[in-house]
Amino acid sequence: MSQPRKVIITCAITGAIHTPSMSPYLPVTAAEITEAALGAARAGAAIVHLHARDPSNGRPSQDPALFREFLPRIREASDVVVNLTTGGSPTMSVEERLQPALQFAPEVASLNMGSMNFGLYEMLHRFKEFKHDWERPYLQNSDDLVFRNSFRDIEHILRACSANETRFEIECYDISHLYTAAHFLDRGLVKAPLLIQSVFGLRGGIGAHAEDLMHMRRTAERLFGDAYVWSVLGAGRNQIPMATMAAAIGGHVRVGLEDSLWDGPGRLAHSNADQVSRIRTVIEALSLEVATPDEARAMLGLKG
Ligand code: KMH
Ligand code: ZN
């Protein structure tokens, strides 16, 4: 990995982990997701990572009809790179998760590199009142939940998306996931440059210490050399510290309300754009520049 002169900011707009009762600012409807994505792009995000939600109750959904409500609006109004989730929510089947990426052939889709526990204990206990019936059991049941991404599941997603020339945001929640990515690179099922998105600070994945970051980077360097582009996301309060450290040592960054609801201790972010602006300030303070969508396309070899 060479030191980037330009830093790609990905903004993950709404995700599937946070629930509407946790923040009034979490985008739920198509209009909210559209506005949040366009606001993030205006603030400096080159890539928006998108999930959909049922507008009646904010529940995560992979129904392509919901994606159809906002994708054309985003694509018409902005040249931002669209990245669609294939992770959906840990409660969904792989087939269900795959539908939006298959139907809309995005430039980028997320691809999760292993099965793991996905604990939401802190959120269940921090946020006590819930507006919708589904929220409490969703969080409670996470203690028993395995986010399934078997080798066969990963291969299935890769093969299904290959006809569309979609490339992948390879989500690595632990060191072992880098080895899984190397396995698929060896088999020719993913192509260089890999976009490795290292995820820190989720319960069930690697921690969010500077040593964890360095171990992830060292291992990625050894496995992929010049064949990868490295991006980092920190969950919750780890978001800006991890992104800052990553930017300082040559990485790209991901922010957004999918990964953290916060814009400082005890202060909810009012928008995705707020978090993009915050990390943009850090990047520029490091004398680095923010990449445009087209610069990101060139760095990542996207179909455009
Ligand atoms: N929720 C993030 C930690 C996906 O959409 O594929 C990882 C993610 C999963 O973005
Ligand atoms: Zn996601």
Image (cartoon, rainbow, N blue to C red):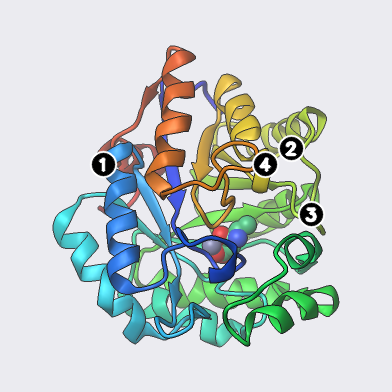
Residue under circle 3? 205
Looking at the image, the residue that sits furthest to the right is: 144
Mark 4 or mark 3, whichever is nearer to me:
4
Amino acid type, residue under disc 1 in the picture: Arg
* Label 1 CB less than 8 angstroms from ligand 2: no
Q: Is residue 261 left or right of residue 57?
A: right
* Label 4 CB less than 8 angstroms from ligand 1: no
Which callout, 1 or 4, points at the residue further toward the start of the chain?
A: 1
Mark 1 or mark 2, whichever is nearer to me:
1
Q: Are marks 1 and 2 in contact (CB under 8 Å)?
A: no
Q: Is residue 229 left or right of residue 184?
A: left
Q: Are marks 3 and 2 in contact (CB under 8 Å)?
A: no
- Ligand 2, by image quadrant, is bottom right
Residue under circle 4? 237
| Residue 185 in view, yes or no | no
| Residue 294 in view, yes or no | yes
Which callout, 4 or 2, points at the residue further toward the start of the chain?
A: 2
Residue 215 higher or lower than 12, as above or below: above
Residue 70 higher or lower than 176, as above or below: below
Residue under circle 2? 216
Please, what secondary structure does the residue beneath circle 4 have?
Answer: helix
Q: Residues within 10 Å of mark 3 (few under 14, many from 20)?
A: some
Mark 4 or mark 2, whichever is nearer to me:
4
Residue 138 spot, x, y in % from top left: 69, 80
Query: How far, Cα to Cα, is label 1 from label 4?
Result: 24 Å
Please, what secondary structure does the residue beneath circle 2 have?
Answer: helix
Query: How far, Cα to Cα, is label 3 from label 2?
Result: 12 Å
Query: How far, Cα to Cα, is label 3 from label 1?
Result: 32 Å
Residue under circle 1? 42
Q: Are marks 4 and 3 in contact (CB under 8 Å)?
A: no
Which of the 4 quarters of the picture holds residue 231?
top right
